[in-house]
Image: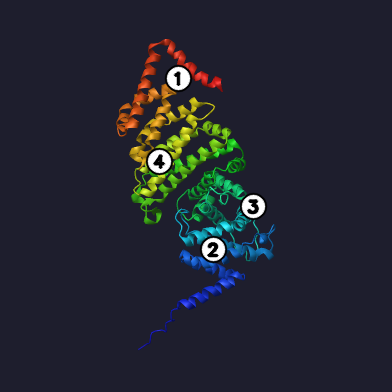
């Protein structure tokens, strides 16, 4: 009878603590192996346990060790910094919302804030030397690929948007030295024609879905714009190659969102085609990505239009008002399948942000207001804004804005082009739109008044020949004033 092989007795808590302390001491002394080992162990620890690792993770991020020209003498310092940033990210992965932090998570966030002057300089270094460089340094022991550098940089940028109060000077997003990096990566995510690179970048972001890299970078850009930092808009324009180029990239951005929508929805893919690995709370990952990307795009257009009037006009020239309106309609259809309240809130916010952009143009000093209104109406704005409450959960609260926008449109019916489009809209869909508007008193009242004015002006123009001259002059007067 064979005896069972001897089993190693389990390590008690004291033994484990001694092993960890040994690894910490070795890592602090410059052991790359032990530092990497701590990163791997830390992934399974609770936030309270991670606190003891924070000093060692930040220990090797001394900016004085950043070389101008990489030589063999710098390899150890670079690799230690690489694993230190990996460790920092492991701790930051537990910080999901700055509004709901335990004491341990707040300590983790505070460590990043107090050491950010170390971190962002290394992030800049890894981007320049290992991602953006056309000829990155290759030395024995320097084990950093372009994909690893991209993952490190983007994850740190994502996390800096979550840490720190955007209303205070300590906000990490207000780091001017990183604005060119953020702008360059966003432009690449939107415009790159290198499908192999984009596929690899999406994979590096931890997603199988096309567009994950664009989603990550659009979030970072939106976070920068949320703090209303005009210098970031200036940097974005400069990196893009000027105002017209940025408007073109913004147009490409929203077209990418619509292209992904058509690929997924119009091809027949639905929630039942999605595996558990590709969903969050039963919502397909690609749906969440589309909602996030569109909401971030609306923020980009709204904020940058406010900060730069030339850019605002370039957006209009690129037909972005119509593209936003078309995408609003896509969002309504997409939202019909949302079953989780948390993601329904994201859809509602994205919808309201887009309406905010359209309202900004309607009420602001644009060069050709009639062109804006016509773009909006031709893109089927009226059916979209009326149908929103039946498609987007929680949109009832936004119906006041919907009604206000329909009321605002009434004041432009004295322009011939606007009146013609509105009349065609009524003639084609009046009955179906009437049925939709019945659901809300304010919406119904605004819609009925809009229809009444359309008919009144159409009758006036048809019955009194001189009225046609008045409507034509109204259109001409807009251009004369400008």
| Up-down relation of residue 435 to residue 290 (above or below) | above
Q: Rounded to the nearest whole Å, what is the CA distance between mark 3 and mark 4?
A: 40 Å
Q: Which mark is residue 331?
A: 4
**Secondary structure at numbered mark 2:** helix
Q: Quadrant of residue 150?
A: bottom right
Frontmost of labels 3 and 2 is 2
Circles 4, 2 touching at the beta carbon (< 8 Å): no
Mark 1 or mark 2, earlier in chain: 2
Q: Quadrant of residue 149?
A: bottom right
Q: Which mark is residue 416?
A: 1
What is the x, y in percent for residue 208? 45, 53
Quadrant location, the C terminus? top right
Q: Rounded to the nearest whole Å, what is the CA distance between mark 3 and mark 1?
A: 56 Å
Q: Rounded to the nearest whole Å, what is the CA distance between mark 3 and mark 2?
A: 28 Å
**Secondary structure at numbered mark 3:** loop
Mark 3 or mark 2, earlier in chain: 2
Frontmost of labels 1 and 2 is 2
Mark 3 or mark 4, earlier in chain: 3
**Secondary structure at numbered mark 4:** helix
Q: Residue extending furthest bottom?
A: 1
| Up-down relation of residue 333 to residue 72 (above or below) | above
Q: Nearer the viewer, residue 48 or 202?
A: 48
Quadrant location, the N terminus? bottom left
Circles 3, 4 touching at the beta carbon (< 8 Å): no
| Up-down relation of residue 241 to residue 446 (above or below) | below
Circles 4, 1 touching at the beta carbon (< 8 Å): no
| Up-down relation of residue 467 to residue 454 (above or below) | above
Q: Quadrant of residue 62?
A: bottom right
Q: Which residue is mark 2?
A: 87
Frontmost of labels 4 and 2 is 2
Q: Which residue is mark 3?
A: 134
Mark 3 or mark 1, earlier in chain: 3
């Amino acid at each position: 009878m064979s005896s069972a092989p001897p089993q190693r007795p389990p390590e008690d808590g004291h033994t484990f603590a001694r092993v960890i302390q040994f690894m910490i001491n070795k890592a602090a002394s410059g052991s790359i192996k032990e530092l990497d080992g701590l990163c791997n162990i830390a992934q399974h620890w609770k936030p309270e346990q991670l606190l003891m690792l924070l000093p060692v993770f930040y220990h090797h991020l001394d900016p004085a060790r950043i070389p101008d020209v990489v030589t063999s003498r710098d390899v150890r310092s670079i690799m230690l910094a690489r694993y230190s940033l990996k460790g920092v990210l492991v701790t930051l992965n537990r910080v999901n919302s700055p509004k709901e932090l335990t004491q341990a998570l707040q300590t983790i966030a505070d460590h990043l804030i107090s050491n950010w002057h170390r971190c962002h300089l290394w992030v800049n270094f890894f981007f320049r030397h290992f991602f953006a460089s056309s000829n990155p340094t290759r030395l024995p022991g320097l084990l950093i690929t372009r994909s690893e550098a991209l993952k490190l940089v983007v994850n740190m940028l994502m996390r800096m948007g979550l840490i720190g109060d955007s209303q205070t000077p300590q906000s990490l997003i207000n780091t001017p030295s990183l604005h060119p990096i953020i702008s360059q990566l966003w432009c690449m995510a939107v415009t790159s024609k290198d499908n192999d690179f984009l596929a690899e970048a999406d994979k590096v972001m931890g997603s199988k879905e096309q567009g994950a890299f664009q989603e990550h970078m659009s979030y970072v850009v939106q976070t920068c714009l949320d703090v209303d930092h005009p210098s970031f808009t200036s940097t974005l324009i400069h990196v893009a190659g000027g105002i017209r180029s940025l408007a073109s990239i913004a147009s490409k951005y929203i077209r990418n969102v619509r292209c992904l929508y058509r690929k997924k929805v119009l091809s027949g893919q639905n929630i039942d085609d999605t595996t558990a690995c590709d969903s969050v709370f039963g919502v397909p990952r690609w749906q969440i990505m589309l909602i996030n990307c569109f909401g971030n795009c609306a923020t980009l257009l709204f904020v940058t239009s406010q900060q730069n009037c030339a850019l605002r006009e370039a957006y209009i020239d690129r037909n972005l008002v119509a593209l936003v309106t078309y995408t609003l309609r896509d969002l309504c259809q997409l939202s019909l399948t949302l079953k989780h309240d948390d993601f329904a809130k994201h859809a509602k916010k994205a919808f309201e942000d887009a309406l905010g952009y359209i309202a900004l143009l309607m009420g602001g000093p644009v060069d050709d207001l009639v062109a804006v209104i016509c773009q909006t109406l031709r893109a089927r704005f009226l059916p979209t804004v009326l149908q929103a409450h039946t498609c987007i959960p929680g949109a009832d609260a936004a119906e006041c804005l919907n009604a206000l926008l329909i009321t605002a449109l009434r004041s432009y019916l004295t322009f011939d082009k606007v009146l013609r489009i509105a009349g065609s809209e009524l003639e084609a869909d009046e009955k179906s739109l009437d049925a939709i508007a019945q659901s809300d008193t304010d919406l119904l009242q605004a819609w009925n008044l809009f229809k009444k004015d359309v008919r009144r002006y159409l009758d006036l123009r048809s019955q009194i020949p001189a009225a046609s001259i008045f409507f034509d002059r109204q259109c001409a007067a807009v251009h004369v004033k400008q």
